[in-house]
């Protein structure tokens, strides 16, 4: 796990880095530390970060300026901040967790453990880069999500698509539990599935309420049947 810590207070940054190293164990790359938004943007542009640990108050700089951009990135973001009144706003942008200062080693370990699992707070929007900026796509407007290499394509109910820099695996960690991976290339909302249908060569597909048919991976069929029968 490659970590980037954005924290302008040297003592706080060193403590956070030390606790992260203890949690990740020997052999893991040491966390990188940045004290300013410009420095952090330069590191993130290298696309060599898995998890961003971000303070929201950086010597007068507003961490939300970076958070809005980070939400569209391929990595996951954990906010570590005393600004607890901003937690809801942060979750709406798609952070994996919000660790309030002062925090304990156990609370930080819990946040890092959530990397690779479902987020504690359901997401309502997905951030994507568009036209040189970042736009928030309401999750309710997404019909389904299709893998596109290291990225994911959001297929919209009203037509058109938006490209997310997050992979399907990363999106699985952020999306509400009613989204299910039905195939290595598809994520759908279970409530949008009308029925299971037979496909060519004894394969199975789902038919969505708008008539769209998507393939179901054989290894995922059992879990899908259980969810539909629940």
Image (cartoon, helix red, strand yellow):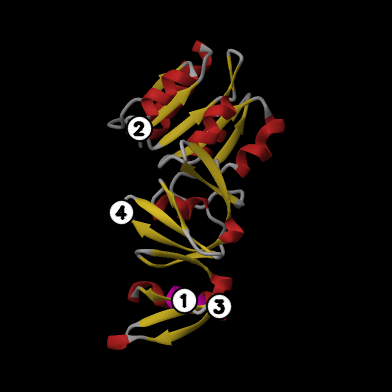
Most frequent secondary structure within the magenta stretch: helix
> Callout 2: helix, strand or loop?
loop
The Cα atoms of the two marked residues, 1 and 4, are separated by: 22 Å
The Cα atoms of the two marked residues, 3 and 1, are separated by: 7 Å
Front residue of 43/148: it is: 148
| Region rendered in magenta | 222-226
- The answer to which of marks 2 and 4 sits earlier in the sequence is 2
- Residue 120 pos. (x, y %): 59, 49
Q: Is the residue under label 2 in contact with that under label 1 (CB below 8 Å)?
A: no
- The answer to which of marks 1 and 4 sits earlier in the sequence is 4
The Cα atoms of the two marked residues, 1 and 2, are separated by: 46 Å
> Callout 4: helix, strand or loop?
loop
2 vs 4, front mark: 4
**Most distant residue in the right direction:** 85
Residue underneath mark 2: 25
- Residue 9 pos. (x, y %): 53, 13
- Residue 39 pos. (x, y %): 42, 18
Residue underneath mark 4: 149
Above or below: residue 184 compared with residue 40:
below
Q: Quadrant of residue 182?
A: bottom left
**For this view, does 148 lie left or right of residue 91?**
left
Above or below: residue 125 compared with residue 84:
below
Residue underneath mark 1: 212
- Mark 3 closeness class: few <14, some 14–19, many ≥20 residues within 10 Å: few
Q: What residue is rendered at 34% in x and 34% in y?
A: 47
Q: What residue is rendered at 31% in x and 32% in y?
A: 28
Q: Is the residue under label 1 in contact with that under label 3 (CB below 8 Å)?
A: no
- The answer to which of marks 3 and 4 sits earlier in the sequence is 4
Res. 98 mark: none
Residue underneath mark 3: 209
Q: Is residue 229 magenta?
A: no
């Amino acid at each position: 796990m490659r970590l980037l810590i954005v924290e302008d207070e040297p003592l706080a940054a060193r403590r956070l880095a030390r606790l992260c190293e203890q949690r990740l164990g020997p052999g893991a790359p040491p966390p990188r530390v940045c004290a300013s938004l410009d420095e952090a943007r330069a590191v993130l542009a290298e696309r060599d970060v898995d998890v961003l640990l971000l303070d929201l108050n950086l010597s007068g700089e507003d961490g939300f300026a970076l958070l809005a951009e980070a939400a569209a990135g391929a990595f996951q973001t954990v906010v570590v901040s005393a600004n607890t009144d901003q937690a809801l706003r942060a979750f709406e942008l798609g952070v994996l967790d919000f660790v309030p200062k002062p925090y304990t080693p156990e609370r930080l370990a819990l946040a890092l453990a959530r990397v690779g699992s479902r987020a504690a707070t359901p997401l309502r929007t997905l951030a994507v880069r568009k036209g040189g900026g970042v736009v928030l796509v309401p999750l309710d407007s997404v019909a389904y999500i299709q893998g596109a290499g290291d990225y994911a394509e959001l297929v919209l109910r009203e037509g058109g698509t938006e490209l997310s820099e997050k992979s399907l695996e990363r999106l699985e960690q952020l999306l509400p539990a009613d989204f299910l991976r039905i195939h290595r290339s598809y994520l759908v909302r279970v409530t949008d599935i009308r029925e299971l249908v037979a496909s060519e060569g004894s394969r199975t597909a789902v038919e969505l309420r708008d008539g769209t048919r998507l393939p179901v991976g054989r290894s995922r069929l059992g879990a899908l049947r259980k969810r539909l029968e629940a």
